[in-house]
Image (cartoon, helix red, strand yellow):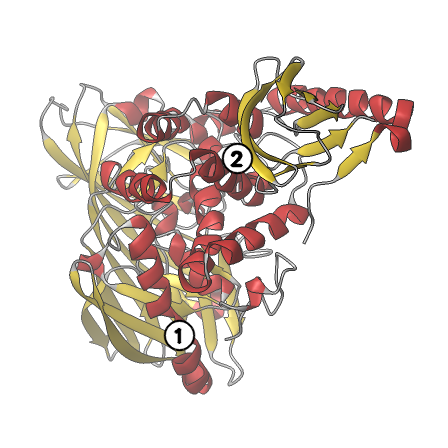
Amino acid sequence: MIDQKVFTYNTLKTPFFILLLFAFNSGYAQLLHHNHQHFTEQDTLRGSITPERAWWDLKYYHLDIEVVPNEKFIKGSNTIEYTVIKEHQVIQVDLQEPLKITKVTQENDELKFERNGNAFFIDLKKKQKVGDYNSIKVFYEGHPKEAVKAPWDGGFTWSKDENGNDFIATSCQGLGASVWWPLKDHMYDEVDSMKISVEVPQHLMDVSNGRLIKVEKNRKKKTKTFHWYVDNPINNYGVNVNIGDYAHFDDSYDGEKGELTLDYYVLKPNVEKAKVQFQQTKKMLEAFEHWFGPYPFYEDGFKLVEVPYLGMEHQSSVTYGNKFQNGYLGRDLSQTGWGLKFDFIIVHEAGHEWFANNITDKDIADMWIHESFTAYSESLFLDYFYGKEAGQEYVRGTRSNIQNDIPVIGIYYVNSEGSGDMYYKGSNMLNMIRQIVNNDTLWLEMLRGMNKTFYHKTVDTKEIEGYMIEKLGKNLSPIFDQYLRSTIIPTFEFRTNAEYVFYRFTNCNPKFEMELDIEINGKHQRITSKNGWQTLRADEEIKSLEVNDNYYISVMEIK
């Protein structure tokens, strides 16, 4: 693990202050660079709520496609149903190159459309009247982008299993679902429900989101079509296709809302390993229903599906590629030993069912809402089964993964996510706030209440910050500004004499302040420190001062 470092003035002297000044200026420079990145028209069309998106409210999709593995080719259609909330005659649908839309119809009329990069603007003949419920059907085809390093650089993964059978999967977070199907590709408007129909060679199986409602055989084409239905709202990147020579086994979990069906799809040679490893699913559900409330998609069940990449949080169809072992491909990301107590992909990716799939960001700039809370869920899993200190030791250990390169919050309206520090800088921030709150009953109520308040909703940072501030009764705004919108980590400086402590925060935003737990001669003391010297008089001669290590700060004693 990496603890907070204590620097002494005698050791560092002047070079420390030069380093401190450089760190502050470097952080400011990174922030300026982050805010002055070059964005294109395509970034705006992808990342903003354009006039051609704003006038209609998405209600239902029927995605109906055929996947042809030996050609790495897909073709099909998406029926898009919507209500009109403002009169407009042009609708935007997104589909990324090299795929192309071949035809669009509304009530059997073929419509004209124009392409601008990855955005298609479709002229509607029918008058769009406020309150009307309408639909269009978009036909498309082509060779979709092949994933380079799924799931981080996603698309279609075309692979083979050990028996030579096709093993295929989609992943598209950040890149966008329009990399493989046409849709309203913006996070703010989730579809209320959808049907997914996937035609594959007859010896293979498709596993998608929701529940399997029908399998159709086409003997002439030697294919099968698998029809899945999603009863709940679903974010666009959560929709997936997984194709392979799967074996299926199932189970159930007696949860807070009754019986939850558990379905597992793995390659046939891996069934016995999966039956052992996937027992952790019930432990995950037990811990997370405790911390976050009921699993958000009982109607659609819960699935783990083996894929040829590491894994992803596809809603009710969580994908798994961790090779049936604990840790992150056998490694402990915290370097504490605790990370080997659980299968990282089962815990982390399923944690996203609450944070990403239940509570979804409106703009990818706020992706920390997904990743910070889910990274923190790893420590809460340990907390539930092994005790609070185990969970906190784990989250502290993950600090070695923090880069402090750019701010955690990205640039709005241009499909720009922030730093990868949204994982473990974010989880350490949450762990620190829990320390400040110092009321685990209230902390639990906040986490469960958040998933109830924002149930099946899209949110932004302002809403999450406001909810936490109100529920916890703490002024957390300086903390959010410091840790989400800046790259600099505060330094707590102090010096002592026989009876006084002089202390302040440096290397921080001018208005930063935070409650802090310290021990003077082994006795707990809570102070509020800010940017500017403060004084505390002790009850006895000061022999030692230590800062609680759940605070993600630097500490420097000035001799």
Q: Which mark is residue 493?
A: none
| Position above or below: 193 against 111 | below
For label 2, the SS is loop
Disc 2 residue type (three-letter) = Glu
Q: Quadrant of the N terminus?
A: bottom right
Mark closest to the chain's N terminus, 1 or 2: 1
Of residues 271 and 483, which is closer to you in this image? 483
Q: Which residue is mark 2?
A: 417
Q: Looking at the picture, does residue 28 appear above or below residue 157?
A: above
Which quarter shows the C terminus?
top right
Which residue does the image show at 46% across and 86% down from the upper left?
A: 269
Secondary structure category for the residue under label 1: loop
Q: Position of residue 175 (x, y in %)?
A: 49, 43
Is 141 left or right of 98, judged from the image as shown? left
Compared to 493, does 233 lie above or below? below
Q: Residue at x 39, y 74 (%)?
A: 278
* Distance between the alpha carbons at the discs numbered 1 and 2: 32 Å
Residue 537 percent location from the top left of the image: 63, 20
Q: Horizontally, is 24 left or right of 91 in the view?
A: right
The type of residue carrying mark 1 is Phe
Which residue was labeled with disc 1?
Answer: 278
Image coords of residue 306 (percent x, y): 43, 71
Quadrant of res 230: bottom left
